[in-house]
Image: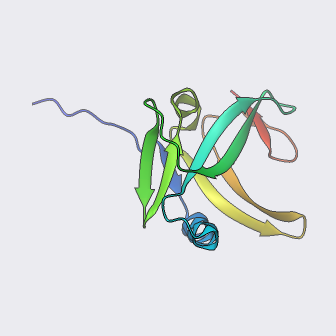
Amino acid sequence: MTEVFVPTPIHLTERAVSKAKELISGEGNPDLHLRVFVTGGGCSGFQYGFSFDEEHQDDDTEVVKDGVTVVIDGMSYQYLVGATVDYSESLTGSQFVVENPNASSTCGCGASFSL
């Protein structure tokens, strides 16, 4: 029998899970999930995006951790396999961030990347 390795598309830190739970609870809608996506733009060519929604597309991939569902669309999936989503708080602001082993370079602010 041949084993097939299917990589976990995306990992979530405990901070990211905790913040997502807090934000979803604040909206009062337990059906919300965190959508992580990649779009063209930024100074390095691609940028990450985050939103909360209830939509599910046919090509979406879902990852569930500790009650939080992360959804990745089909186009973004290829860029996010193996990435880690964290939540960062600093003097300059608070935000979800992506640590992506697929990125060959990132811009100085960390908001965009290239492959």
Q: Is residue 62 left or right of residue 49?
A: left
Residue found 89% across the figure and 70% down from its top: 91
- Image quarter for residue 94? bottom right
Location of residue 11 with respect to 76 vertically, above or below: below
> Looking at the image, how many numbered discs can be counted on the residues?
0
Q: Nearer the viewer, residue 45 or 66?
A: 66
* Whether residue 88 is situated above or below residue 64 in the rendered picture: below
Farthest left residue in view: 1
Q: Is residue 41 left or right of residue 77?
A: right
The image quarter containing residue 36 is top right
Q: Residue shown at 54%/57% (left/top)?
A: 32
Q: Could you tell me residue 35's position as x and y percent? A: 58, 47
**Percent from the top left, x then y, of residue 29?**
54, 65
Q: Quadrant of the C terminus?
A: top right
Instruction: Measuring from the top left, give residue 12's x and y in whole percent.
Output: 53, 58
Q: Is residue 99 left or right of residue 3?
A: right
